[in-house]
Image: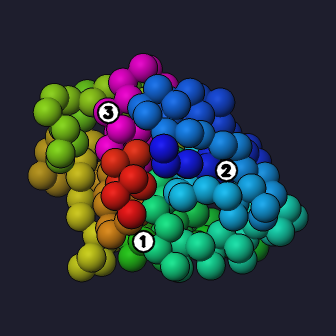
Amino acid sequence: MVRIGVLALQGDVGEHVRALEESGARAVSVRRPSELASVDAMVLPGGESTTMSKLLVAFDLLEPLRERLGAGMPVWGTCAGMILLATDVLDGREDQRSLGVLDMTVRRNAFGRQVDSWEEDLDVRGLDAPFHAVFIRAPRVERVGPGVEVLARAGNSADGAVVAVRGGRALATSFHPEVGGDHRLHRLFVSMADGS
């Protein structure tokens, strides 16, 4: 059984752990380098991206995580996790770090503040039916590089904001798929991790 870590420094850790377990993986909370070393793949959950980047440094996880991801470990970033995976971050702080896994530019809090949060049914490439997505202070992808595939756009329109991408062994979503009980994206990630 594939072992998937969930970065447990902030955010929807418990929800991701449950969804991964219900999707056929062994889920592990990761707070230390030794826990990171024991997993086959990682989920970087939602939360606050600047705080998460500072906590990665404080918990001595930033460089070990960069090394594992650089070696090809599968990873999925949701909301703030998407920001952490980007090569370029707009509207971030100068001390904010990213992992640079996906060749994309992401804008933090692109859709507004907490009160501007919303839900919509998204057409996600690879899924057989729309996915009910929950957006909370969500980022959006402003640019993707040649190796990054767009999986979904807000409003399901050709010119809608990019809100889900995949590149190699990395998946990223602007929204919170751990909320709502639809585990199809978690199953997709488990299959990505299991195939590695």
Where disc 2 sits, the SS reads strand
Magenta-tinted stretch: 173-189
Mark number displayed over residue 24: none
- State whether residue 194 appears in this view: yes
Task: Determine contact: label 1, label 3, CB under 8 Å.
Answer: no
In this view, the residue farthest toward the front is 1
Tell me which label, 3 or 2, sits earlier in the chain: 2
Callout 3: 10 Å neighbours few (<14), some, many (20+)? some
Q: Nearer the viewer, residue 88 or 34?
A: 34
Where disc 3 sits, the SS reads helix
Query: Which residue bears the numbered disc 2?
Result: 7
Task: Determine contact: label 3, label 2, CB under 8 Å.
Answer: no
Q: What residue sits 52% from the left and 57% below the top?
A: 41
Query: Which residue bears the numbered disc 1?
Result: 102
Q: Amino acid at mark 3?
A: Arg
Question: How far separated are the C-alphas under marks 1 and 2?
Answer: 18 Å
In the rendered structure, the answer to whether residue 129 lies left or right of residue 134 reads left
